[in-house]
């Protein structure tokens, strides 16, 4: 059975490069979460709460 370390040697990739690449991939996931997902979720929650308040106040006026 071929192990990951054997695949890295066959592909002529050093373990340092593979480790660095993996770290950078995970770091980019966190950066995407901070830059895209969290602000978008915050905006959607804000809009949803305001819409709920608008609907509640509109039903009281009727």
Image (cartoon, grey):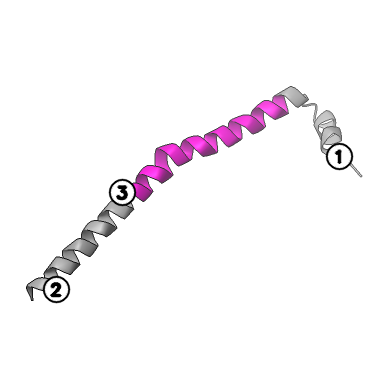
Does 34 sit above or below residue 40? above
Task: Give residue 61's position: percent from left, percent from top.
Answer: 7, 72
Mark 3 crowdedness (10 Å alpha carbons): few <14, some 14-19, many ≥20: few
Along the line of sight, which residue is nearer the eye, 27 or 60?
Answer: 60
Residue identifier under label 1: 3
Residue plotted at (70% across, 28% down): 19
Distance (Cα) linking label 1 and label 3: 45 Å
Q: For residue 12, which quarter of the picture?
A: top right
Residue identifier under label 2: 59
Labels 2 and 3: the sequence-earlier one: 3
Residue plotted at (46% across, 41% down): 33
Mark 1 crowdedness (10 Å alpha carbons): few <14, some 14-19, many ≥20: few
Task: Please state the extent of the stretch shown in magenta in the rendering.
Answer: 17-43
Q: Quadrant of the image for the N terminus?
A: top right
Secondary structure under tag 1 reads: loop
Labels 2 and 1: the sequence-earlier one: 1
Labels 1 and 3: the sequence-earlier one: 1
Residue 58: assigned label: none
Task: Give residue 57's position: percent from left, percent from top.
Answer: 13, 66
What main secondary structure does the magenta stretch of the protein show? helix
Distance (Cα) linking label 2 and label 3: 24 Å
Task: Give residue 8's position: percent from left, percent from top.
Answer: 80, 31
């Amino acid at each position: 059975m071929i192990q990951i370390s054997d695949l890295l040697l066959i592909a002529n990739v050093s373990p340092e490069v593979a480790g660095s690449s993996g770290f950078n991939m995970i770091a980019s996931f966190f950066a995407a979460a901070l830059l895209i997902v969290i602000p978008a979720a915050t905006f959607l929650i804000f809009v949803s709460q305001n819409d709920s308040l608008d609907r509640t106040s509109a039903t009281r006026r009727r």
